[in-house]
Amino acid sequence: MQRISIAFYDEIHAKLTERAKQKNISIAQYVRDLVGIGLRVEAMTEQKDTTNSSDEKLNSEMSAYKKLIRRDLDSSYETLYIVRHILINLLEEDPDKHAEILNTAKVKSRSFVDGLVGDEP
């Protein structure tokens, strides 16, 4: 075991002495225990900070990408929807059939985008 010299202010030394006596251990052992606890807490905090910051960053980036992809897909499928509408109007004159086909195209495109992206906007 290595030895080092440490100086404490009088009030801190008094607290260390009092608490070491309460635990029936030497001041040196009490200080060693405190240092060990401090090192474990520091290691856990560093690990947690690294994990949380990388997870938060990843979640934030994923959310931004999902929004971008959703907007692009919605735009693409809306364009497809409009093209279908135009083609239907040119080919048929039955308005009831137009509404049904357009609604079906819209539902299918939204369902497809939801399936790709995975959640609601």
Image: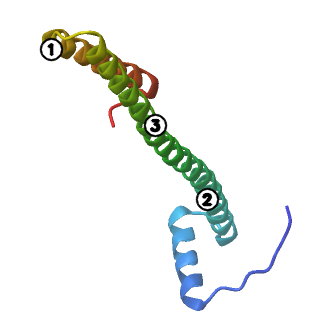
Furthest-right residue in this view: 2
Mark 1 → mark 2, Cα distance in angstroms: 77 Å
- Please name the amino acid that badge 2 sits on: Ile
Front position in the image: 18 or 111 = 111
In what element is the residue under mark 1?
helix
Mark 3 lies on residue: 72
Which quadrant is home to the N terminus?
Answer: bottom right
Tell me the crowding category of disc 2: few under 14, some 14 to 19, or many 20 or more residues within 10 angstroms, Cα based.
Answer: few
Is residue 106 positioned above or below 91 on the image? below
Marks 2 and 3, the one that precedes in the sequence: 2
Q: Residue 115: image x %, image y %?
A: 41, 20
Q: Which mark is residue 85?
A: none
- Please name the amino acid that badge 3 sits on: Asp
Asked whether, in this view, residue 106 is left or right of residue 5, the answer is left
User: Which residue is pictured at 33% across the width and 26% down the height?
Assistant: 82
Furthest-bottom residue in this view: 10
> In front of the other: label 1 or label 2?
1
> In front of the other: label 1 or label 3?
1
Q: Which mark is residue 95?
A: 1
Asked whether, in this view, residue 20 is left or right of residue 64, the answer is right
Mark 1 → mark 3, Cα distance in angstroms: 29 Å
Is residue 92 positioned above or below 78 on the image? above
Front position in the image: 100 or 7 = 100
Tell me the crowding category of disc 3: few under 14, some 14 to 19, or many 20 or more residues within 10 angstroms, Cα based.
Answer: few
- Please name the amino acid that badge 1 sits on: Pro
User: Which residue is pictured at 58% across the width and 55% down the height?
Assistant: 49
Mark 2 lies on residue: 37
User: Which residue is pictured at 52% across the width and 71% down the height?
Assistant: 19
Asked whether, in this view, residue 56 is left or right of residue 27, the answer is left
Q: Are marks 1 and 3 in contact (CB under 8 Å)?
A: no
